[in-house]
Image (tube, helix red, strand yellow):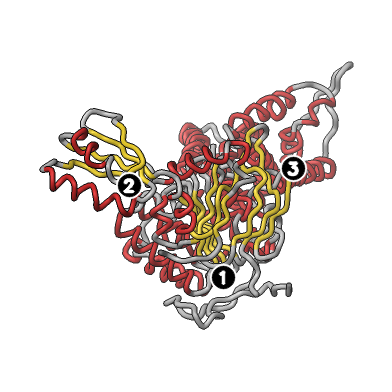
Amino acid sequence: MSERAPVVGRGSSARDPDPRGAAPARQVPSALEAVRLLAGLSLRRTRRGRLFWLTAVILALPVAAALLALISGHGGVPFFDELLGVFLRYLAPFIMALHAPATVAEEVTGKTITYLFSRPVARWTLPLGKYLGNLAVNAVLMLAALALIYVFSMIGERDALVLELPRLAMGLFALLLAAVLFGAMATAFGTMVTSFPFVATLIYVLIVEVGFSFVPGWFKVTAMTVHLRAIAGLYHPKESMWLSDPQLTLGVSLPVVLALAAGWLLIAIAWVGSTEYRTDK
Amino acid sequence: MSEPLVTTEKLCKWYGKVVGINDFTVTIPQGVTGLLGPNGAGKSTFIKLLIGALRPSKGTLRVLGERVWGNRLLLARIGYCPEHDGIYEDLTGTEFVAAMARLSGTPAAASRKLARETLEQLGLGAAADRRLGEYSKGMRQRAKLAQAMVHDPEVLLLDEPLTGCDPLARAQITQRIKELGKAGKAVLVSSHILHEVESMTPEILLVYKGQVLAEGNIYRIREMIDEHPHKIRVACDQPRVLAQQLIVSPDVHSVHFEQEGELVLETRNPDGCYPLIPKLALESGLKIRALTSPDNNLQAVFDYLTRERGPEGVAKAAVKAAGGGAP
């Protein structure tokens, strides 16, 4: 039997009655192209979904708080730092966990995964595409919310709006990393746990990310929220005779966060590549 | 000679202790083939194995002579329409079909145009820019078909494509499937309704409880089935009077009464019996309310074949009815 070339096209058969006529030859999409297409599909769906508006409403709450602080004259650097801390420790993991169902889980429960797995694209491109699509929407929303909070917090202070820009830059950077990391975590959970992935992700976030971050001593480095706060300049280790908190710097925390994000994505990729998702239940 | 569409050898798929398909050995030729079986027979499992969504537990499987699992080049040649109703509710018809075309390798510039044309062909031109969530069941079915056809695949695997369609849509889809077959495409259509498949192709593969029960030409299979007494149920005002007249006919094997106002006769010559019943009723002044055949459905065929072969002998005694056309 002769090997078939990867280029296939319409109109090769003289008997073809297809009224659409000859179509351009097509090729199997490259992995990069598949990721881009799946990310675009995910982005389009997320933008139109209810989850988008729920996320926007949740993020509007701290923005509203900053606006109230401006009106009542309670803004400034400490207020901004406090809200940034809330973003990194609670909001970012919660919002990304909220989007865990909008990953592979959504395709399985909606049974639409059969359309994707019957296409000539590598399976691993699916979680990666979903991840990037969700990340794009949520990162933009979260960064925009933080930028607004910064403006409302600093506008009442003399020159602070300009002078504190490096603080905003580090805050935005840390928040972007939070979206990257917790987005990867949510993708992994949404790939492995197709029933109630939000609950599974939330349990993990509450135990590890929130719970462990309050534990004194070296154990707290297992919580990524600690590293993210270190990157944002919000981490202040406590000294104690028995259990002192570790010293964390950007040089330590940044590679840890990136490595863990990559780890979560690798778990998702490995899982989707070997799993038979059933849509007949 | 062209490669068969599908060849399997002792193919098995188990979901834990549940058997999806078992010891499935079959060769499906090119052209249009109907995959027939009652719900739960293993039709969808078989099709999902053909697109590589499931991995065989045991045995070999080839589509167009190639292995399936992880074979992206093969998937580019296949169009698949799933049996379920799941669809991207928040996309428009055009967006959905164009996205699937892109994922199948159609260039960006052409995908939207092709999507619209395919939807148009299936009678969804006016609804192409509406969200799929607003589509009726029949429209969704056609949108699902459009995404399977948009990239002009050599092979179409259609799992219950007529489910939920109105008569007009059924006629359109049936016609399109026949055209595709004539154009040299290999089409495997699954259904649990015999006449649905009969309207598309005489070539069938009968599956039951995860095993191949019969394969080949439907008319040959029917002839084999006709060798056993065929049941005809007659609902009339005086069934015992009619029974007296029928029983003297050499074509009638037996007559019995199952319900009030009804008789069931068994015959080895249904073609001779069907005109005889109204003739006798007319001569005797009897009123016939209904004339039905409990045998004339797929379940009866399965019941007969499984009863004749015995549950454990189904695979061994699978009917092979090669060649032959419509009588």
In the picture as drawn, the residue positioned furthest to the left comes out as B285
Q: Amino acid at mark 1?
A: Thr
Q: Which residue is mark 2?
A: B250
Location of residue B128 (image quadrant): bottom left
Q: 10 Å neighbourhood of mark 3: few (<14), some, or many (≥20)? A: some
Secondary element type, mark 3: helix
Secondary element type, mark 2: loop
Q: Which residue is mark 1?
A: B106
Of residue B95 and residue A132, the one placed in the foreground of this image is B95
User: Relative to A21, does residue A201 appear above or below in the rendering?
Assistant: above
Of residue B78 and residue A240, the one placed in the foreground of this image is B78
Of residue A35 and residue B157, the one placed in the foreground of this image is B157
Q: 10 Å neighbourhood of mark 2: few (<14), some, or many (≥20)? A: few
Of residue B88 and residue B319, the one placed in the foreground of this image is B319
Q: Which residue is mark 3?
A: A267
Report the residue at 61% width, 53% height from top. Answer: A117
State which tag comes first along the sequence, 2 or 1. Answer: 1
Horizontal side of residue A194 vs B286, given as left or right: right
Horizontal side of residue A54 vs A245, given as left or right: left
Badge nearest the viewer, 2 or 1: 2
Report the residue at 74% width, 25% height from top. Answer: A212
